[in-house]
Image (cartoon, helix red, strand yellow):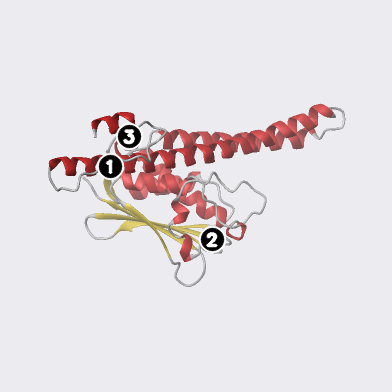
Amino acid sequence: MRAEAAEITGSDLHRRIPEPVGQDEIGRLARTLNSMLGRLESSAARQRRFVADASHELRTPLTSIRTSLEVGLAHPDRAPWPELAERAVTETSRLQHLVDALLLLARYDDSALLNRREHLDLAALAREVVAAVPSDVPVEVQLDAAVHMAGDPGQLNRLVRNLLDNAVRHARTKVSVTVTTDGPHTALIEVADDGPGIPTADHERVFDRFVRLQSARTRHHGDATGTGLGLSIARDITTAHGGSITLADTPGGPGARFVVRLPIVH
C-alpha cells in the first residue's frame, strides 16, 4: 500500500490502492485513501475544465480587439476609427469583468470568500444596489423597513448586483427586487424578471460556471451576454454565508425568479 501510494502523482490520480478483503484497520485505511484519491481526481478534472473554459473566454474578447485594430492598421485612411474604438472599449470592459470574476473564483472557499462579518441592513444595501445598476426597464422594489443581519457587505452587494444584472439583461418590461424576512431567523431576497424564463431542466445548470442558455433568453441579441460567471458567484457567496439560492417559477407568467435565503446571524 505504501509503495503504491508513493507512485501516484497528479497525472495518474485514476489509480487506486489495492484494498484488502477484511474489515480491519488496514482495509478501512485503504478505502479511506481511495476515497480521498477519488475526490482529488474529481477536483483535478474540474480544475482542468475550468482552466480550459477560462482560456476560451479570455481569448474571445482579445481576438475581437486584435482583429479590430489589425483591420484599422491595414487601412488607416479608410478605417472607421470611432466604431473600432467603441468596439475595443466594449470588449476591454467585458475582459475586465471576466478577469475580476476569475480572480474572485480563484480564491473561493467558504472562509476566503467571507472576508468579514459586519452588522448591516440588507434592505438598505439592496436599495443602494438598485440605485447604482443602470437599467432600461423599470425595477420594482419591495423592501422591508430594515432587515438586520451579519455578513460581508461587499460580497452581499455583489450577490444582489449579479442577480439584478442578470434580471435586467433578460427582462422584457420589468424587474422586481424584494427583500424581507421569512420567519425570525431567515432573510429573503427575491429578484425576478418577465423574460422568456429558464427551462426546468436548466434550473440547476444555470448556476454552473460559464453556462449561457439559448439566445431566446437574451433580450438584446448581439450584445455581450455576460461572463457566464455571475450566477455561479452568487451561489458561492450565498453558500459562504450559510444560505441557499434557488430558481423558482414566476407567478402569473414567464420569467425567472431567483430566491436567496440567508441565515440572520447577529
Label 1: how many residues lie within 10 Å, few (<14), some (14-19) or many (20+)?
many
Q: Position of residue 112 (x, y in %)?
A: 32, 34
Tell me, yes or no, if residue 33 can be seen here: yes
* Residue 188 placement: quadrant: bottom left
Question: Is 27 situated left or right of 191 in this image?
Answer: left
The residue indicated by pointer 1 is: 34
Q: Position of residue 14 (x, y in %)?
A: 38, 41
Q: How far apart are labels 3 and 1 at the CA level? A: 28 Å
Q: Quadrant of residue 217?
A: bottom right
- In the rendered image, residue 226, in percent from the top left (x then y), is placed at 56, 46
**At numbered mark 1, what does the secondary structure look like: helix, strand or loop?**
helix
**Distance in Å between CA atoms under marks 1 and 2:** 52 Å
Graded by Cα atoms within 10 Å as few (under 14), some (14 to 19) or many (20 or more), the crowding at tag 2 reads some
- The residue under label 2 is 174
As shown in the figure, which amino acid type bears the numbered disc 2?
Answer: Lys
Mark found first going from the N terminus, 2 or 3: 3
Task: Kindly identify the amino acid type of the residue bearing the numbered disc 1.
Answer: Asn
74 in relation to 31, above or below = above
Gap between marks 2 and 3, in whole Å? 35 Å
User: At x 44% / y 47%, what residue is drawn?
Assistant: 232
Check the image and name the residue furthest to the bottom.
Answer: 252
Extreme residue toward the right, this view: 77
- Three-letter amino acid code of the residue under disc 3: Ala
Secondary structure beneath dot 3 equals helix
Quadrant holding the N terminus: top left
